[in-house]
Image (tube, grey):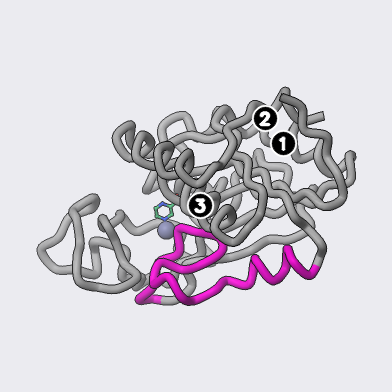
Amino acid sequence: MGFSIKTTDALIVVDIQNDFLPGGTLAVPEGDQIIPNVNHLMKKFSALGGRVILTQDWHPSNHLSFASQHPGKNSFDPIEGIAGIGPVLWPDHCVRETTGAAFSSQLDTGKAHLILRKGLHRSVDSYSAFTENDQKTETGLAGYLENAGLKRIFICGLALDYCVAWSAMDGAKKGFETCVLPDLCRGIAPESVQTAEQGMKELGILFISPGDIT
Ligand code: VGL
Ligand code: ZN
């Protein structure tokens, strides 16, 4: 299946930040391996007239998604009862203005037209680049895409089972034609990757490979 890139297309590169890479506090296995191919795609995409958007997880140091904020709880423990937080707690990660929150030095950020930060509110997480986990606070990305006349989105990055999947599912729900590039993604855990893939399929999201983009 071929996808020829138009000026109404956006590539959303999710959370390629030090803390999600090997050595980081919430390392996604093999997360670093996608970077050269993501760089290549960003270059191609922007050369073809598409728009490139980067997202950056950007938490206050006392973010309520961190297990450290819940006495007696550990990272990856399930959490219930706080709207906008969960389903699990995380190690401290991507604290704004720290090295862990910075983009990988290998990522070619120069190709980005827009950098969108998310997860800024202490008591609401935002896996999705569109709508925060309370399911009502908007990041503004949908408005940006609509205003710029962007109709189709391609998504890659970290982590496939959380921020990539939730972004893709919200994009599809908002009416954007949505394609995910699994070859240019890595997930945190196999079980959550499977759940996420199922959820994306049910919404009609297409799984494509970088070679399909021309
Ligand atoms: C992410 C967990 C917590 C992600 C961000 O980028 O997928 N996952 N914060
Ligand atoms: Zn986070």
Question: Label 3: few (<14), some or many (≥20) within 10 Å?
Answer: many
Residue 203 in magenta? no
Residue range (magenta): 122-147
Q: Amino acid at mark 3?
A: Met
Question: Label 1: few (<14), some or many (≥20) within 10 Å?
Answer: some
Labels 2 and 3: the sequence-earlier one: 2
| Residue picked out by circle 3 | 169
| Residue picked out by circle 2 | 36
In the displayed structure image, the side of residue 92 where residue 99 appears, left or right = right
Labels 1 and 3: the sequence-earlier one: 1
Q: Is residue 110 visible?
A: no
The structure residue drawn at horizontal position 68% and vertical position 48%, both measured from the top left corner, is: 153
Residue 16 position in % (x across, y down): 57, 46
Q: Is residue 146 visible?
A: yes
The structure residue drawn at horizontal position 30% and vertical position 55%, both measured from the top left corner, is: 90
Residue 129 in magenta? yes
